[in-house]
Image (spheres, rainbow, N blue to C red):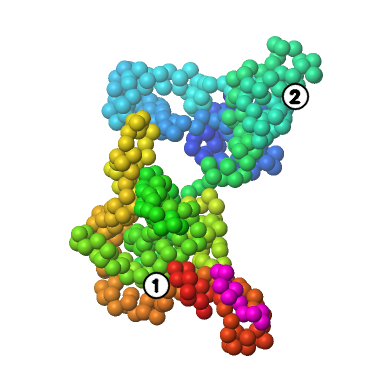
Amino acid sequence: MIKVNYQNKIWNLHREDNILILIDVNNGSNILKIEKREFENLLYQNIIVYLDDYASQKQTSSLMYFDNEENHSEKIKTKIEIVKRYVNYGKDYNKKDFCIYAKKQLKIKWSLSTINRVITDFEKCGNNLNFLIPKKQVRKSRLNKNIQKIIMDCIQKEFANTHRKNIRNLYEKIKIALYKINIEEEGFPSYQTVCNYVHKYGYDLDVEKKRLGSKEYYKRYGAVFNGVKTTYPLERVEIDHTYLDIKVYVEDTDEYGNKRALFGRPVLTVIKDHYTKSFLGYYLAFYAPNTEISIRCLKHAMQRKSEKYSEIGEEWIQYGRIKEIVMDNGTEFKSKKFAEVCLNLGINLIYSSSYEPWLKGTVESAFNNLSTLLERLPSKIRKDIIVGQKVEETVISFQNLDFLLNLWIIKDYHNKYNERTKNTANNLWVNYFKDNNILDAEIENINFDLMDVETIYRKLSRKGIIINAVRYNSNELNDLFKRNKKFKLTKITNDAKRFF
């Protein structure tokens, strides 16, 4: 039983929720109730002093010994009510009749034997409330303070580091440390005791953080918050790339004009609107993500989509000028060319922080949604492909994949009810942009051809300038040479003849 010295008296301690009950040892009717915070302040000021050395240790100052079951306070209240009725009306009944009476009056589900046990314990304690104190005694640790200190030191030095040794190795290190101070093997802690110490004090010592490292620990245990709130379409869009787990072929011509078929996994770049959760545009390519792919995807998202496949029967209505775009820290997004294009279009660039996927969760969820489409394709890369199966049966043409993506986005995804927005993507878009004239007016003055440009630097001489192994010279270039020798040229990516 935990005993303390307070006001020059010895008290037994009992806990009821956040209230500490002090019961005088010499006079059971003398009861004090103190809140937990006030008790800890008195304990800190040494006004209340533990009489048990083990209970007064630092790790026990948080009242870890008190009974803290969720339903314990209700049990205590019920026992007190039973005792009150027994003191007032117990003389009028025998014990069995009184138990029936108390159960009926208090409307409790306790058995008669349990109620009788409460009365018996009350009488054994001399008709005072000492019987409410739990009978469980606090078992003092058999390990002395020196051994406990060695265990804690070994946990910090041998276990809480990036070597990630297991508890079995830690146990061996503890035994070696105890051998060095000539402690007999009978006094060694058990393996289970060491496990209990690791699990009990691991959080306070930041064991997991020291073993994993700050980045991995934050990635595994960091809190996940809600994303940014938006109030209208095109306010915030998100862009990202992914490799599709399907085999695709496309017909192409080599440098000699011969037809050839290319096979591989395509890269899909997607731009998605945060408010409506709709797809604004995408771009399919066979090469690794780069700046050119990102710009072409941005161009497709902002332009009005023509009816590319008439058999779909519906129009892709999402387009318009973007206010801000969110992306990761890929080199293709941090390039000077991508920044210049967004600057000319008046688009704010936002780079999401590492290990914070909720800042870019809309486009991340788009790839999960695409998996429902890819699973139904025969060209899906699977681990159970039969050996010797024909290639034609496990690939899909680039054109068919492009058609399926358009069909799935326009017919399925944009008309599907979204649990988060409580509406469909098309309905949210139409409710806000009731007239397309607003969208058309915003993109009317945008020269989309300038998005397919590449900035190059060339040195001008008396002989003119060399571009793609072709020399250009004129009187106008000679006049420019007299002013400056180095010039910045803008080249149309898809047209080798256009420079300005």
Residue 261 drawn at (x, y percent): 38, 49
Q: Name the residue under label 1.
A: 321
**Which one is nearer the viewer's eye here, 495 or 234?**
495
Q: Which stretch is magenta?
A: 461-471
**Which one is nearer the viewer's eye here, 102 or 285?**
285
Q: Mark 2 points at which residue?
A: 146
In magenta stretch: residue 466: yes
User: Looking at the image, how many numbered discs can be counted on the residues?
Assistant: 2
Q: Nearer the viewer, mark 1 or mark 2?
A: 1
Quarter location, residue 40: top right
Quarter location, residue 282: bottom left
Q: In this view, does 434 lie to the left or right of 254?
A: left
- The kind of secondary structure element at disc 1 is loop
The relative height of residue 14 versus residue 391 in the rendered view (above or below) is above
Label 2 packing within 10 angstroms: few (<14), some (14-19), many (20+): few
**Which one is nearer the viewer's eye here, 476 or 304?**
476
Q: What kind of residue is marked 1?
A: Arg
Residue 87 drawn at (x, y percent): 40, 26
